Amino acid sequence: MGKVEYIIKRLLLALLVLVGVSIITFVIARLIPSDPAALYVGPRAKPETREAARIKLGLDRPLYQQYLRYVGEVLRGDFGISVRSRRPIVDDLKVFLPATLELVLLSMIFTLVIGIPLGVLSAAFKDTWVDHSSRIFAVINVSMPVFWLALLLQLLFVRQLGLLPVGGRVSKEIAILAPIERITGFYLVDTALRGNWSAFRDVLQHLILPSVALASYAIGLSIRMTRATMVEVLQQKYITAAWAAGLTRRTVYFKLALKNAIVPTLMVLSLSFVWQVSGAMLVEIVFLWPGLGTYLVNAILTIDFPIVVSVALIVTVFYVFSNLFVDVLQAMIDPRVSLE
Amino acid sequence: MTVKREKTPGQAQSAWSARFLEYGLMWRALRRDRLAVISLAIILIFVLGAVFAPWLAPYPDQALGKSNLAEKLDPPSAAHPLGTDDVGRDLLSRILYGSRPSLSIGIFVVGLAMLIGTPLGAIAGYSGGWIDQAIMRITDIFLSFPALLLAIAVSAALGASFFNAMLSITLTWWPWYTRLARAQAVSLKEQTFVEASRAIGVPGFTIIRRHIIPNVLTPALVQATMDIGSAILMGSALSFVGLGVQLPKADWGNMLNVARLYFNDGPWFAIFPGLAILLIAMCFNLLGDGVRDVLDPQSRRTG
């Protein structure tokens, strides 16, 4: 199967998946709750209001019409309104999504610079204390409830050592003295673009703990996966030849061997992206990070159901596209890739 | 016809009894893996603790919700070995009772996912064609949701309760077993003993039941051992965001959700429930690694 053919097939599959995802979120949003109109108007509404809402939401129409209408709305970027604040959900998403993505991207960088080198070292020093300790470190990381790790980091670095801020995205002082001008919504980028370095430092300090907490699971995962592939690669003949040719350890491990472990590494990154976006939901609450997670959890507590479904949908769409991106990239790099 | 009828039940029996023989051998090999044995022992201690919680807990009434405001946020002491929570309840008792929902989620979610996913995968892999396509595309769709988000959305839709949390996590879990079973079934289908059964006219459904499923069972069980820890983690995450066990009933996740607000005055309140989650998840992961190594010696060298 040719590359182009593969990529086209993969795109079609992604489209199919998106249709399926929209059906499932439609079912969750409209069919599972016994009365979506009651959810829409809130618990204290009068029966007349609820009846009006039922018609406004189109709940009196046949199911397939309701579904088509739902898809149309979502495609136009209309996610409905919050039951509590009556604000359009899409306006909130525009504010909270960049905050979460900034956190996730930084924690992916942590995953790359900690997880992959440790995995390589573990394979290079297989069955020595280096290997054992990095494997134990990996097991602890994949078994760690991420919200608890977030609490522990807070206890250590904030309460005990007083090194970093307890939570939020930016300090009050900075918000007043050197306010951040909103350009991309990514505060690190926005402050750098404006040369607002005091704010940049402040934003970075706020980012460190949550993104380290968020990275933990992915770090554990990438140590294990990198180690597994590296051990396999290191047994191959071209590596023996490289040793015989007298190449340095660094060249052999990080240049020759790691290059062939690149596909699994990409897998790790795509897996970790997904995991970190969902993990962010748990970490954000602990650090009072104003992102999708805090938004989602507050919506759960106030039973603001449309928000819950919208956040699930938007994160899933991100997930589908990141998987698509990785698969296509993989197909370009690795000639062996094909659909099953 | 008569020959066929006599033969297939006999074969089926041997396929299943071969499993038991295999598990006996596996256990012998597993016993040499020190980490796995220690993990299993700790898991058994947790299970015993969960089963006998009413007898072991020093203050069972507090574990069930009775508050004790005179002893709010007391540090660990002889009366309360792990300290007390925000309304003075004994933490040891609550952690003991909290192991019940956590372990049940781990076992029920994985068991149910296996029960749904494995037969579906066996059917898909053995039948091929449009049945295969339909089943596998549905699993693709479910797997394209980030599991935690799907579980959160579904349990929010069903209403916050322990039972609904369990159902919604299962909903995100079964497709993995379908994929696993399908891959096995596809290769089993080509093997001689299956081809032979087909040749003598055994119906497809019977082949799936007697030959495919028993042979898919072992990899599925290994996967299950490795998954229980993750299922417990997800269960505690759901209860941490307020969707699992509801207060005042004790659960490790909902304890942590309250504890984060009292971090200054009572760090032990946050430390012990989290430690319990970490320990149980880690033991299941290590046991899972051990079981996998025994079953697949190839992975011992690489993984």
Image: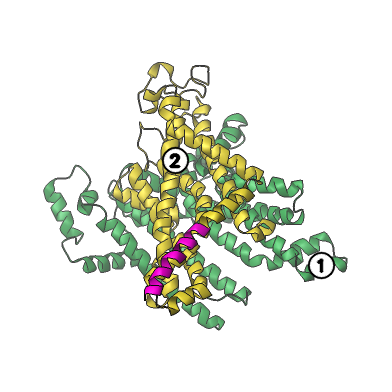
Side of A337 where A284 appears, left or right? left
Residue A237 on the magenta segment: no
Location of residue A173 in the rendering, given as x and y in whole percent from the top left corner: 52, 38
Chain letter for the residue marked with disc 1 in the picture: A
Graded by Cα atoms within 10 Å as few (under 14), some (14 to 19) or many (20 or more), the crowding at tag 1 reads few
Q: Amino acid at mark 2?
A: Ser
Residue B144 visible in the displayed image: no
Spot occupied by residue B83 in the image (x, y as percentages of width and height): 50, 23
Question: Which span is picked out in magenta?
Answer: B1-18
Residue A243 appearing in the image: yes
Q: Is residue A270 above or below residue A283?
A: below
Q: Residue at x 59, y 52 (%)?
A: B26
Given residues A328 and B253, the one toward you in this image is: B253
Question: For mark 2, does the 10 Å Cα neighbourhood hold few (<14), some (14 to 19), or many (20 or more) residues?
Answer: many
* Chain letter of the green region: A
Against A331, residue B41 (above or below) is: above
Residue B130, above or below B258: below
Residue highlighted by disc 2: B102
Seen from the viewer's position, the closer of residues B205 and B119 is B205
Q: Residue at x 62, y 49 (%)?
A: B28
Left or right of A259? Residue B167 is left
Q: Are marks 1 and 2 in contact (CB under 8 Å)?
A: no
Relative to B266, B208 lies left or right: left
The picture places residue B100, in percent across and down from the top left corner, at: 42, 37
Rounded to the nearest angstrom, the CA distance separating label 1 from label 2 is 49 Å
Mark 1 highlights which residue?
A: A240
Residue at the image position 82 percent from the left and 60 percent from the top: A249
Q: Which of the chains is yellow?
A: B
Q: Quadrant of residue A334?
A: bottom right
Amino acid type indicated by mark 1: Thr
**Residue B36 picture location, percent across and down:** 61, 45
